[in-house]
Amino acid sequence: MIQLQNHEPTRFQFDSNNRRSMSITTFLLLLLLSPAITATPTAYEMLESFHFPAGILPKGVTGYELDPSSGKFSADLNGSCSFSLEGSYQLSYQKTITGYVSEGRLTELRGISVKILFFWLNILDVVRVGEDLDFSVGVASASFPLDNFFVSPQCGCGLDCDDFRIRKLDLGNRKPSLSSV
């Protein structure tokens, strides 16, 4: 025969030291978790969410704004920026870059230019096509392998700043395709 006993629920009693300790612990826990809850993605993470590599932006982006309904964005650098890539191009970024972003497309860009021969041309659009990025300057475009853009270049020295060498773009077994639009 089983006997059931009637038990009252256990009650925990906290003295003032336990309450203070719990309050401090709760406060610290909330303090530690709040940045993770409210953290805004960086400009580099935002680009990656649209399937672009972070390295199409140089290091030094201090903030950005994005209108999710239209895709209009602006990104702010800590100053204007330029660097060269050996055997390729000299790039220049203004302090503020604007344009529109959508899945695999950056359009109506303002604030990025490339030096081809003796002329500076504005990069207007960047489109991801498979494992390549196509950069358009309006009348012409050039295509480069995606893996050239996994690392963000640094203003002044590009990608090889440790030993002050300028990195050459890896074109694989092909030359960048240049086509007129």
Image (spheres, rainbow, N blue to C red):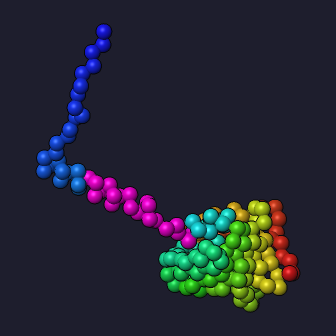
Q: Which residues are magenta?
A: 25-44
Q: What residue is drawn where x is 23% and y is 55%?
A: 24
Left or right: residue 39 compared with residue 15 = right
Could you tell me how many numbered marks the image carries? 0
| Residue 70 appears anywhere in the view | yes
The outermost residue toward the top is 1
Question: Is the magenta region chiefly helix, strand or loop?
Answer: helix
The quarter holding residue 23 reads bottom left
Q: Is residue 36 magenta?
A: yes
Q: Nearer the viewer, residue 48 or 114?
A: 48
Q: What residue is drawn where x is 23% and y is 50%?
A: 22
| Residue 92 appears anywhere in the view | no
The quarter holding residue 50 reads bottom right
Compared with 164, 25 (above or below) is: above
Residue 62 position in % (x across, y down): 49, 77
Residue 151 position in % (x across, y down): 60, 65
Q: What residue is drawn where x is 76% and y is 83%?
A: 137
The quarter holding residue 105 reads bottom right
Compared with 120, 32 (above or below) is: above
Compared with 35, 117 (above or below) is: below
Q: Is residue 87 magenta?
A: no
The outermost residue toward the bottom is 119
Residue 41 position in % (x across, y down): 52, 67
The outermost residue toward the left is 16
Q: Nearer the viewer, residue 130 or 100?
A: 100
Q: Which quarter of the figure is the N terminus placed in?
A: top left
Q: Which quarter of the figure is the C terminus placed in?
A: bottom right
Q: What residue is drawn where x is 56% and y is 71%?
A: 43
